Amino acid sequence: MKTSKPRKSAPFEPEQRLITLIAILLGSKQPLTLDEIRERTDGSYGPLLDPGKQDPQGQKAYESGRRKFIRDRENLAKMGIPIGCVKKGVGHKECDAYYLDPNHLRMPEVNLTFKELGILRQAAAMVNNIEAFPLSQDLMLGFAKLDAAMAGVDLQSSKDDGELTTFHFQHGLIAQNPETQKNLAALFDAQMYRIPVTFSYRSSRQSDFKERKVDPYSLFLKRRVWYLVGFCHLRKEVRMFDVNRVFAVKQTGPRNGFQIPDDFEVAPWRTLEPWDIASHDAVVTRIRLERPVASLSSFSNAAVIAKEEDGSVLIELTVRNNEALFGFIMSLWGRAVIVSPPESVQAFNDLVRRIALVHGFQENK
C-alpha cells in the first residue's frame, strides 16, 4: 500500500499574502524578524535556512522570498500602510525586525452633513429589513453610531486612571444649555464610577419637582433623547428617567458606592418607548394607524386587534405616560387616532385644541 507524502501548503495569492502579513504584524506584541514572519506565513517569503547546511537551491528561494517581502512592504506603503523597522538582537545576532502601527489602519474621519446622515440611515434601514440579512447585528451597531451623530453627540474620549473613559457631550437637540450638559456629564461620570446621585425630577406634565436619590446603572440614547436607568431609593425599585426632566444633579457618595446587580441588563430598558416611563397608572389604550404608519417600529410591541381592508390597523398598548404618547401621535400628522379609552381621547383633543389656540387657529378648525 502506497503512502502519500504530506501535502505542502499552497503559496498565498498576492492579496491574501498582504492581508496575512498585516494580520500577523498587528497580532504580534513585539516586532518580528523576517524569519519569524516566514514561519507564520507557511513559507510565503521563502524557506528558513539551516546555517550548518549548504543548500544553493534553498539559498536562492530564501533570497527570492526576501525580495518578495520588500516588494510587499513597498506596496503596502503606497496604500498608506507603512511597515516600520527596528533593530532586534545584540551583537552579531542583531537583525531587522518589523512592526505595524494600528493607527495607520484607522479609517479617515468622514464629515457628513445632517441630511447625508439621514439618507445613509434610511438606506441601511431598508437593507436591514431583508429577512435573515447576515449583517443585521453590524447594522444595528452602525445605527447606534448614526443616531448619536445625528443627535449632535461628540463622544471624544480621554484616558482616566488607565481604565475608565470620561465622555463629553454636545447634544444639538437636547443639551441646549450648559446646565443640561453639566447634568448629563455628571450622570455619566457617576455611572462609570458607581457614585450615587441626587437630583430634582419632574414627572410628565406635573409642575412640581421631587427629590430623587438614584444609583445610576446605565445611560443610553434613543431617538435623540438620553435616558437614565438606575435604582430609585424613593420608589425602591429600578426606574427609567428622561434626562430632559432631570435638574440639579449632585454626586452624593464615594466611588464604588453601590453595586450593580449581576442580573441587571440594559437591553430590555432600551426597548421601552417614552410612553412606558411611568408617570401615572397604566392605561390600556387603543389606536388606529393608517397604512403608511401601520408598521412603525415604535408600536412593534403593541397587540394588533384588527386589520382593515385599506391597510390600517387597530392596535392596543399599555400606556403609563400619556404626554409622551400624545406628542408622538401628533408627530404623525393625523395618520394615527386614539380610539379609547374616552378619557384619553378627551385629554388628547383638549391638548390639540390648546395648542391650536396658542398658535392662533380658530376653534372650529
Image (cartoon, grey):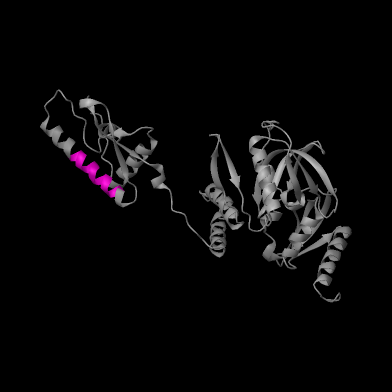
Q: With respect to residue 104, does 122 lie above or below?
A: below
The question of residue 70 being in magenta is answered with yes
Return the residue nearer the eye: 189 or 39. 189
User: Could you tell me which quadrant the N terminus lies in?
Assistant: top left
Q: Residue furthest front?
A: 178
Residue 284 screen position, x and y as percent: 83, 52
Number of residue marks: 0
Q: Nearer the viewer, residue 255 or 351?
A: 255
Q: Give the quarter of the figure containing the C terminus.
A: bottom right
What residue is at 39 percent from the left and 36 percent from the top? Answer: 27
Query: Taken as a whole, is the magenta stretch helix, strand or loop?
Result: helix
In this view, 142 is above or below 3: below
Q: Is residue 271 visible?
A: no
Q: Position of residue 184 (x, y in %)?
A: 67, 47
Name the image quarter holding residue 336.
Answer: bottom right
Residue 140 in the image, given as x and y percentages of width and height = 57, 50
Position in image of residue 270 (x %, y %): 67, 46
360 vs 257: above or below: below
In the image shown, does 338 or 253 lie closer to the viewer? 253
The residue at the point 73 percent across, 41 percent down is: 250
Range of magenta residues: 64-76
Is 125 magenta? The answer is no
Q: Quadrant of residue 70?
A: top left
